[in-house]
Image (cartoon, helix red, strand yellow):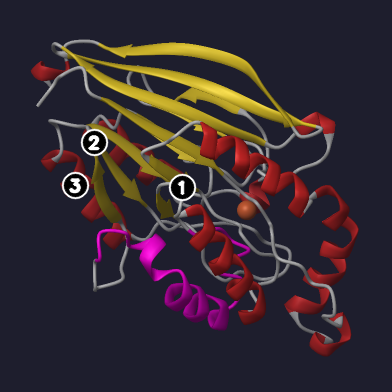
Amino acid sequence: MNTKERTRIVHLSDPHLSSLDGVMARRFLGGKRFLGALSWRRRSQHHLRATLDCLTNHVEKKEPDVIVVTGDLVQIGLASEIDQAAQWLDSLSKIAKVVLVPGNHDFYQADSVASACQSWAQYLWPDGNKRNTFPSVIRVGNTTIIGLSSAQPEPFWSARGMVDEGQLNELEKILQDSTGSMRCVLIHHPPIEGRCAGRKALRNSKALQGVLDRGRAEFVLHGHVHRNTEYCINDYTKVFSTASASNALRHASSSFRIFDVVRDQSDWRMVSTLEVVHDSRCGEIMTSEIVWKDTALR
Ligand SMILES: [Fe+2]
C-alpha cells in the first residue's frame, strides 16, 4: 500500500432536516411528542433546509472518500420524518459513502427506533452487517470507522444517552484488532463529562472513556451540542464536535469538517479543516495538523 495515500473524511451533524409542516401537535396530546412538536415550532426557523442544501453542495466540491453523520436528522421521530431523512441520505450517498450514527431525536420513541433502523439500515450498517447491532465497523482507505449508538428513547425532559455494555465490550475488541489503521469513533453524545448539561449527557461516559483510553483510539467525532469544539480525552485521543449542518444562526453557523489522514512512516498525520457556511458562501476558518508519533510501537 502506498503509505502516503490520503483518506478524506467529511464530518457533519445534527441537520434536523425534517419538516413538521402539516403535523398537528394536538394529535399527540399528553405525550412526549406533543411537547416535542411545540418545542420544535420555536426552534424551526434556526434550522433551514436551504442552509443544509448549500452546505451539501460545498461538501460535494471537497470530494470526500466518506461522509460521516453523527445523528439528529429529525425532530420527533415520526415515520414521515424518517422517510424525508432517508431521501436526504440517498442524495448524500451520491457524493460518497455515508456512515451514520443515530441521535436522541432519531430514536425518539420505540417506534422511531424501528422505523429508523429499517429505513436507514444501509447507512447505519454500511458494512452490510446483517445483525444490525452496534458498533458498526467499516474500513475506508487507511481509516477504520467505528459507529456507536448512544441514543435511546428518554422522557421528554431528558436528552441523555447511553452506550450499553455489549457495545463497550465490542469496541474494546475492535480497537485491539485495528491497530494497523487510523481509528475514528463516531457517537452522537459527547464522550466525556462536562461537555453539555447533565440532562443531555452520556450516562456512562466514564466507562466509555476507559475503553477509548485502553484502546488508544486516535479520534472521536460527535454532535448533539450544536457547537464547534476540539479537545482531548487523554494525551492521545482527540475529540471534535461540529455545529448543526442546517443552523442559520450566526453564533453557531452551519459547519462541516474535513479530515485528511495520511500514514507517514510510523506516524499518523491528520490535517483537520473547519468550514463554515454563511449566506451560501463557504469559508475555511481553522486548519490544524495533528501527528500521532511512532504508532508502529503501540
Ligand atoms: Fe442531540
What x and y, as percent, mark residue 174? 19, 47
Assess whether residue 121 is covered by the magenta stretch: yes
Quarter of the image for residue 179 reads: top left
Assess whether residue 24 is covered by the magenta stretch: no
Q: Is residue 238 visible?
A: yes
- Is residue 177 found left or right of 280 in the rendered image? left
Q: Amino acid at mark 1?
A: Ile
Work out whether mark 2 precedes mark 3 in sequence or the reverse, and give the earlier one.
2
- Could you tell me how far apart the alpha carbons at marks 1 and 2 are, in whole angstroms? 16 Å
Q: Quadrant of the C terminus?
A: top left
Q: Nearer the viewer, residue 135 or 250?
A: 250
Q: Residues within 10 Å of mark 1 (few under 14, many from 20)?
A: some
Q: Range of the magenta residues? A: 102-128
- Could you tell me how far apart the alpha carbons at marks 2 and 3 are, in whole angstroms? 17 Å
Give the residue drawn at x 38%, y 13%: 290
What x and y, as percent, mark residue 264? 20, 12
- Is residue 260 found left or right of 40 in the rendered image? left
Q: Amino acid at mark 3?
A: Ile
Q: Amino acid at mark 2?
A: Gly
Q: Nearer the viewer, mark 1 or mark 2?
A: 1
Name the residue tied to disc 2. 141
Q: Is residue 33 shown above or below 210?
A: below
Name the residue tied to disc 1. 95
What x and y, as percent, mark residue 102? 50, 60
Name the residue tied to disc 3. 174
* Residue 15's disc number: none
Work out whether mark 1 precedes mark 2 in sequence or the reverse, and give the earlier one.
1
Q: Residues within 10 Å of mark 3 (few under 14, many from 20)?
A: some
